[in-house]
Amino acid sequence: MKVLLLMTCAMLMSTSIQSKQNDFEPVEKLLQKALKSKLRTSKDKVRDSNRLPIQTLKFFGLKTNMKVIELLPGNGWYSKLLAPVLADNGEFAVALGTKRVSDNLLGEEGMEFITLIDPDANIHRKDGDKLFSMDEFDLGQRDVDIVFTFRNYHNFNYQARMRMNRAVFRALKPGGVYAMVDHTRRHMEEFNSENRRRIDPVLAIKEAQDSGFIFEDYSDLHHRTADQLLYEVGKEGVTGNTDRFTIKFVKPK
């Protein structure tokens, strides 16, 4: 009887794993194609082996029919991958600090379906401050499946981070995912010039939980033992090799 029960459990687990793999196959095919896009520069491509976009997006549970927002997309490194995946059956928007994506990507082949959400969050840095501030804002959505923030949470002070978390919480549907990747700072280390573009993952978890999120899962995809967490992330030898935490939060159902 015990042997039969164990065999049944093993079969159910195998079926579940296979189902998850099959769910991601359409995304992976589209990502493989997007990775070869002519829109991607040589600087984009050289980062692939470090950023591991396919594995990262699989961890966060991306599907082709989802409604997705990327916060602070920068030059659009991830936008160039997310937009083609979601173009036919999903929705994709970028929000906050969207100027470079707006100027350089909108209208390009495969990028036609990007929506700009640019709420007046008044992102600014006061004289003498090392971190950015922002006003309370709203993303104007209530049914989003995933909100991504890649390596930008560290740029803001406590009040701004909490305002961002609250805006994301409102935008996500129940069960929606808040996907966070950022440079790791030593736990409880005080702010200094070398760690200013890093953040303590324990602090990030606490702030997300204080905003109503559930800590769902953690991945070591971007764990880098060679990074001593001592130096500014832009320094030669450190940039591109930083230890990063990869955390999945969920809005309660």
Image: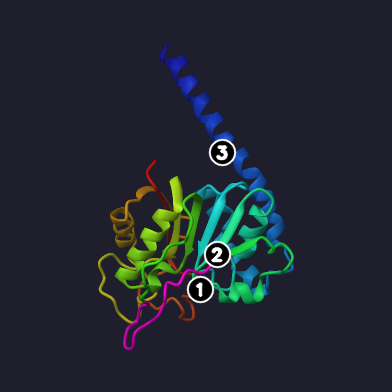
Residue type at the position of mark 1: Gly
Please identify the dominant SS of the magenta region. loop
- Left or right of 81 in this view: 223: left
Pointer 1: what residue? Answer: 97
Task: From the image, tell me which residue sits under label 2.
Answer: 94
Quadrant of the image containing the C terminus: top left
Residue pictured at 72% horizontal, 56% vertical: 33
Q: Residue at x 64, y 53 (%)?
A: 86
Image x and y of residue 88, in percent: 69, 51
* Amino acid type at mark 2: Val
* Farthest residue, direction top: 1
Please tell me whether mark 2 sits on a helix, a strand or a loop.
strand
Q: Quadrant of residue 242?
A: bottom left
Q: Tag 1 or tag 3, which sits nearer the N-term?
A: 3
- Residue 31 in view: no
The Cα atoms of the two marked residues, 3 and 2, are separated by: 27 Å
Span shown in magenta: 116-132
Left or right: where 28 falls relative to 127: right
Question: Could you say where residue 165 lies in the image, as x and y percent from the top left?
Answer: 37, 60
Report the residue that reaches farthest toward the bottom.
Answer: 127
Residue count near mark 3 (Cα–Cα under 10 Å), binned few <14, some 14–19, many ≥20: few
Give the amino acid type for the residue marked by disc 3 in the picture.
Lys
Give the residue number, with chain letter if any, for mark 3: 20
**Apparent side of residue 43 relative to residue 131 in the rendered image (left or right):** right
- For the question of whether residue 131 can be seen, the reply is yes
Assess whether mark 2 and mark 3 are in contact (beta carbons under 8 angstroms). Answer: no
| Residue drawn 34% across the image and 68% down it | 185
Q: Are marks 1 and 2 in contact (CB under 8 Å)?
A: no
